[in-house]
Image (cartoon, rainbow, N blue to C red):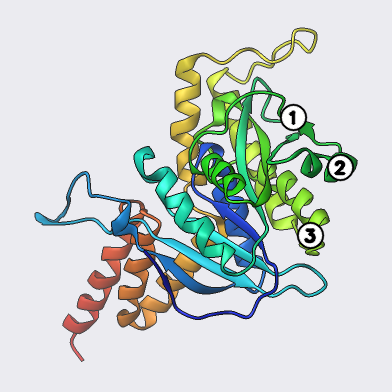
Amino acid sequence: MIKEISTPKIKNPIFIAAWPGMGEVAYRSVLFLKEVMEFKMFAKLDAEDFFRPSAIIAEKGIVDLPTLPAGIFYYAKGKGSPDVILFLGEAQPPLEHAEELSLAIVDFVKKYKAKFIFTFAAKPEPIDHKSDSAVWIAATHPEVLKDFEKLRLKVLEEGQISGLNGIILGIAKRKGLKGACLLGEIPFYTVQIENPKACTNILKVINGYLKLNLNLSPLADRAKFIESEIEKLISYLKGEVEAPSATGPTPLSEEDIDKIKKDLATYTKLPHSAREKIEQFFKDAQKDITVASKLKEELDHWNVYKEYEDKFLDLFKKKDKKKEEPH
């Protein structure tokens, strides 16, 4: 079920787990940690135990079974901070497998003496996209809430945390671990759009609590970019007419919201670091066409091949053209 590649020597690690969800808050927060800290992969969850293909894929008339979503464990040894285990799940399994999967993961990290778990989630609210994103907390035990009192987080007095980002916390409590879910506020009309502002504020809490000394400026810059793109779209949809300040922003219609979600997908599908990596692969492939195989793997990994298909195929056209040119 879980295949260990190595056995790291870590001491009482903090465990942080994430799967994709609303606003991509959980997944992108943990992905940012993985990218900026010295994490190393050490185990992999066997996706075949929890996922079954619901369709086949076709490319140029040839069909094949899709690659099943991966779940990877990473570790980092702390430098003046606790050791950390991360788990990143590429997709959430069907809910009938949620408890079994959560149990497998919790039992696995308990082998490494993990005693505390963090999960993250989004909290849709009727707020404007320019508003700050408050952070809420729900914990396994009253004493955990007390530990976070000085950070003045909002306490989730009642409600639900759906999906694996919530369920694994309940399973962890049942298995004797303490933990907390940090929820970042997002505008209700952006639930399908990346929200780096919510990620930034959640990671500020983690940064201070675990003393990780993170530089969160790239996320803050990304948040400004996303906000500016939403502004442009809203201005376009509203004919660039500003609502009177006394009455506040003009409410968006469902049609407006759908258009914002669709148009922003172009800008928000990939983390900035992933897009940079893909562009570098393109540059390398122009010099060495064998790099194209790695490029294709990266495009498939992020499910963005269609977005780059013409550019990818152009690599081979240019290569063939050079062969045909007389010498």
Q: Quadrant of the C terminus?
A: bottom left
N-term mark: 2 or 3 = 2
Q: Which residue is mark 2?
A: 151
Disc 3 marks a residue whose amino acid type is Leu
The spot of residue 238 in percent (x, y) is 57, 17
282 over 28 or under it: above or below: below
Residue at 65% x, 49% y: name it.
222
Q: Which residue is mark 3?
A: 210
N-term mark: 1 or 2 = 1
The residue most toward the top is 247
N-term mark: 3 or 1 = 1
- From the viewer's side, name the closer residue of 50 and 107: 107
The spot of residue 39 in percent (x, y) is 61, 72
Q: What is the distance, in whole Å, between disc 2 and disc 3 at their CAs?
A: 13 Å
**Label 1 environment density (alpha carbons within 10 Å; few <14, some 14–19, many ≥20):** few
Q: What is the distance, in whole Å, between disc 1 and disc 2 at their CAs?
A: 19 Å
Is disc 3 placed on a helix, strand or loop?
Answer: helix
The spot of residue 291 in percent (x, y) is 35, 79
The spot of residue 42 in percent (x, y) is 50, 74
- As drawn, the label of residue 131 is 1
